[in-house]
Image (cartoon, coloured by chain):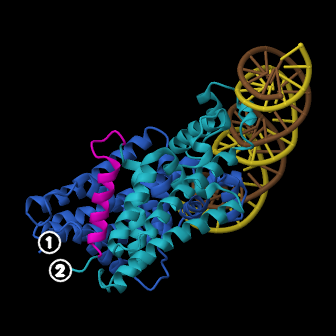
Chain colours: A cyan, B blue, C brown, D yellow
DNA sequence: TATATGAGCTAACAATCGTTAGTAAAACAA
DNA sequence: TTGTTTTACTAACGATTGTTAGCTCATATA
């Protein structure tokens, strides 16, 4: 997990509470005074722990981004698997990372656009890279004849990410279904739509 | 289409430009002075046309909501179709409504949470109703034996909506693929994942 | 012609925003 | 015991926010 978020320092605590606030109200609508109140301190006291409001957003976004990268690296190592198996593993991994911190995931998804330059650019480059690595798996599947050759690869990968990324909005972590079997079901649903009809 | 948005009054023009702004920067981060500048007038002059900033958001959200309702009403009338055919028609309709105004759709999707009460509650009730009507189609398909009986219906309908709703973020209206065939492809991909393996 | 409406302006308001300066007490390290 | 770090405070700053009051001018309607 990202260094800062997983620590138990006061700074990490500030950032976790900020994540909850950003998720509820959005980054721009969340004031530093709101955040301070949630922590039971004064707004000015926040600056003993963080450099700026944006630093919080930066840490939330980039720590999550790193976790996603690490997860995907693991999957790509397993070149003995078929494309559809790797794709499924990638989906499960993505969901597990999300489920580990649904609050930060929601912020990562919906608020990253409020990063200022050049951080926004860096973030978007990371994301494009991540998406392209999933797209590659789909292309591999088509090349192997495992997936239909008629599928629109861009559409397929965008549909996949839409489904994954919206999850923090509706998934209830206290639900009966645990992240791994959720990941499996979702992967089945999405990957089966790509496979050749046997 | 919603009454206000489709008109060519100055008010409608203000709202359309506001939609572009809200989409780019988000509702909260868009100031009335930003909006005025885009229109080449002073901020105070906006209030000759609209009652408040929130009225703009209200109109954007509820006009879109109505369009979605109208589209789904059309589909539900066709009870001669199978569940999967109706589901496909519903998906195509949803995408066509979105494609008719991608900017307003993006605002509808991402900014509705900044509506104040009681409008937010009203909006969410409309949305729940809309989603449940799609869920009903999936349940019908399972009851008919057309869809697998093992599928998690909540998961299926949420995956469906995630895919649909994220579309305004990446779909390029100048692209080679037109809304109807996009709708068909997407419907195929998503509905095939539900069907029984023949 | 008289009147009403649409569309814009300047000036200003009260509130809220992120942030800084300077300070103080407590906890920890040497 | 001394010095350092952590955590918090009060007070205040300049900037920006949505909105209102009061006005002018052009166009459309009666």
Query: Residue at coordinates 41% horizontally, 52% vertically from top-left?
Result: A96
Chain of the residue on which disc 2 is drawn: A
State the residue in front, B144 or A6: A6
Chain of the residue on which disc 1 is drawn: B
- Label 2 – label 1 distance at C-alpha: 9 Å
Q: Is residue A188 magenta?
A: yes
For the image, the number of numbered tags is 2
Query: Residue at coordinates 12% horizontally, 69% vertically from top-left?
Result: B82
User: Is A86 displayed left or right of A108 in the figure?
Assistant: left
State the residue in front, B194 or A136: A136
Image coordinates of residue A183 in percent, x first then y, are 33, 56
Q: Secondary structure at mark 2?
A: loop
Q: Is residue B149 magenta?
A: no
Q: Residues within 10 Å of mark 1 (few under 14, many from 20)?
A: few
Query: Residue at coordinates 53% horizontally, 55% vertically from top-left?
Result: A67
Q: Which mark is residue B197?
A: 1
Q: Residues within 10 Å of mark 2 (few under 14, many from 20)?
A: few
Do we see residue B1 in this rendering? no
Q: Is residue B126 above or below residue B68?
A: above
User: Is B139 displayed left or right of B37 in the figure?
Assistant: left
Image coordinates of residue C28 in percent, x first then y, are 73, 25
Q: Is residue D17 above or below residue B24?
A: above
Which mark lies nearer to you, 2 or 1? 2
Which residue is under mark 2? A198
Image coordinates of residue B167 in percent, x first then y, are 43, 67
Do we see residue A64 in this rendering? yes
State the residue in front, B111 or A105: A105
User: What secondary structure predominates along the stretch shown in magenta?
Assistant: helix
User: Is D17 displayed left or right of A93 in the figure?
Assistant: right
Which residue is most to the left? Answer: B144
The span shown in magenta is: A173-194
């Amino acid at each position: 997990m990202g260094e800062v978020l997983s620590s138990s320092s006061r700074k990490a605590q500030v950032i976790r509470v900020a994540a909850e606030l950003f998720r509820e109200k959005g980054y721009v609508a969340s004031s530093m005074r709101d955040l301070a109140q949630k922590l039971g301190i004064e707004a000015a006291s926040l600056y003993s722990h963080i450099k700026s409001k944006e630093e919080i957003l930066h840490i939330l976004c980039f720590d999550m981004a790193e976790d996603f990268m690490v997860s995907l690296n693991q999957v790509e190592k397993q070149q003995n698997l078929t494309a559809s198996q790797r794709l499924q593993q990638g989906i499960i991994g993505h969901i597990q990372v999300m489920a580990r911190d649904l609050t930060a995931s929601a912020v990562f998804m919906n608020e990253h656009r409020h990063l200022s330059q050049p951080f926004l650019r860096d973030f978007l480059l990371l994301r494009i890279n991540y998406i392209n690595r999933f797209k590659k798996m789909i292309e591999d599947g088509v090349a192997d004849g495992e997936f239909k050759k008629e599928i629109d690869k861009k559409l397929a990968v965008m549909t996949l990410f839409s489904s994954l990324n919206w999850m923090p909005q509706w998934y209830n972590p206290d639900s009966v279904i645990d992240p791994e079997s959720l990941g499996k079901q979702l992967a089945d649903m999405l990957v089966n739509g790509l496979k050749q009809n046997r």
